[in-house]
Amino acid sequence: ARNVHRRGDGVLEVAGVDVLTLQRNFGTAAYVLDEDDFRSRARAFKQAYAAAFVDACGGADVYYAGKAFLCTAVARWVMEEGLFLDVCSGGELAVAQRVGFPGERIGFHGNNKSVAELRAALTYGVGRIIVDSFDEIDRIVALAGELDVVAPVMIRVTVGVEAHTHEFIATGHEDQKFGFALTGGVAFEAAREVLAHPDRLRLLGLHSHIGSQIFDTAGFEASASRLIGLHARIAEELGHNAPEIDLGGGYGIAYTSQHTPLAPALLAEQMSHIVETEFKRIRDVDPDGAVPRVSIEPGRAIVGPAAFTLYEVGTVKPVVVGDGQVRTYVSVDGGMSDNPRPALYEADYSATLANRSSEAPPVVVRVVGKHCESGDIVVLDEWLPGDVRPGDLIAVPGTGAYCRALSSQYNHTPRPPVVAVADGRARVIVRRETIDDLLALDVDEP
Ligand code: LLP
């Protein structure tokens, strides 16, 4: 988080609030979210894409992908910053509704939205439903008839681009559940099907999302090129010039010093060039026709770096691992329940001593959680001062995205709170779960 500094005495502080105060007031483990950092990143994306795409298509819009992390306060920040919002479930839509997020600025994703979810979206007036299958198209036609509305839809296209990222989170290649394949003309047929119901469906555009934690714009360029090619074909053969294309999210962030993400301004600049070149194909079909407006959907790149998790060390255990080698296990009061990403994706994080400075020579330790499972790793190998001890605080940066969102109550562990810090003030935006919360759903009538 950009407002994190280390005080002279070694204590970390964020936006003017030190971690000792955070621990005292909110306990550990806790997610600490730097509000100004979140808002700045959201604004940076919005401004960069609005500016860089002026010549190409009058500016590009930015959706915040709520799946990375969403709660009512964050939905409100996104709304206030003037971004759009990508939701992918009825639950995320309910968060948006709770804060009165304008429906026309919402995009609704998902490969198996239920009838109830679709009904909620159409009733709320969601601006775009991103359709993912022929079954879903049928379902929306029927629902739109029932509700007597015209549903605005985008077609999710599988463009066959495999982004360089962890296999489980790559969604651009064709053998996967999302979207209509470009190859074999499946996506084109989906467009034909949508256009066959002009009284119930409006084809707003085409969408592709090629993966996550991507650092190279080559994948986006390839997907933009293919998407625009399809757009041109739809215009030419079906006579429909769709007004939008969405290039999805996936911008990588630096979890460790190994990664160097591109700044939004540079990303926007690079992507706008390729889009502008590709737009020539649309102008070739219809020289007077408008080109579609571009949008993107970053989640991780906005919220990921804006938060860290604050843990307290409970035990420090040197373990002889053979040949007299010792590995030190530093156990903290959280782990795979609040951040399953290391266990799920072998994701790498870093950790730092947060409550004091230390002159002790650094040693390599393994930071682990408190769960009953040996794969419960927070950071596989990290240099920490050799005198790290129970009671110390450890901060793990970059936990804003897909941590609270993927969290669980594994081992009946109450989920940590999300504490937002801004201008020297900290406030809970998602409260800590309690044991009562854990038991609230149990039904036992002896
Ligand atoms: N748009 C669509 C359609 C998506 O499926 C996703 C992410 C995004 C946008 C946002 O992607 P981002 O900018 O945050 O990379 N749980 C995994 C990540 C799954 C991403 C799923 N889709 C992880 O923790 O790495």
Image (cartoon, rainbow, N blue to C red):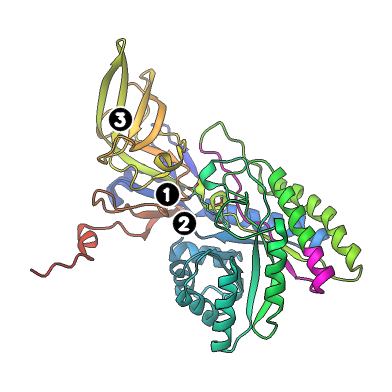
Q: Amino acid at mark 3?
A: Val
Question: Which residue: 57% across, 47% down?
Answer: 170
Alpha-carbon span between mark 3 and mark 1:
20 Å
Alpha-carbon span between mark 2 and mark 1:
8 Å
Magenta segment: does it hold 236?
yes
Magenta segment: does it hold 11?
no
Identify residue for label 3.
330
Q: Which residue occupies the foreground of this view, 94 or 78? A: 94
Q: Count residues near mark 3 (Cα–Cα under 10 Å), then give few for <14, some for 14-19, many for 20+.
A: many
Identify residue for label 1.
403
Q: Would residue 105 be found to the left or right of residue 315 on screen?
A: right
Q: Which residue occupies the foreground of this view, 149 or 252? A: 149
- Label whose residue precedes the other's in the sequence (2 or 3): 2
Extent of the magenta region = 231-255
Q: Count residues near mark 2 (Cα–Cα under 10 Å), then give few for <14, some for 14-19, many for 20+.
A: many
Q: Is residue 155 above or below residue 384?
A: below
Question: Which residue: 70% across, 47% down?
Answer: 267
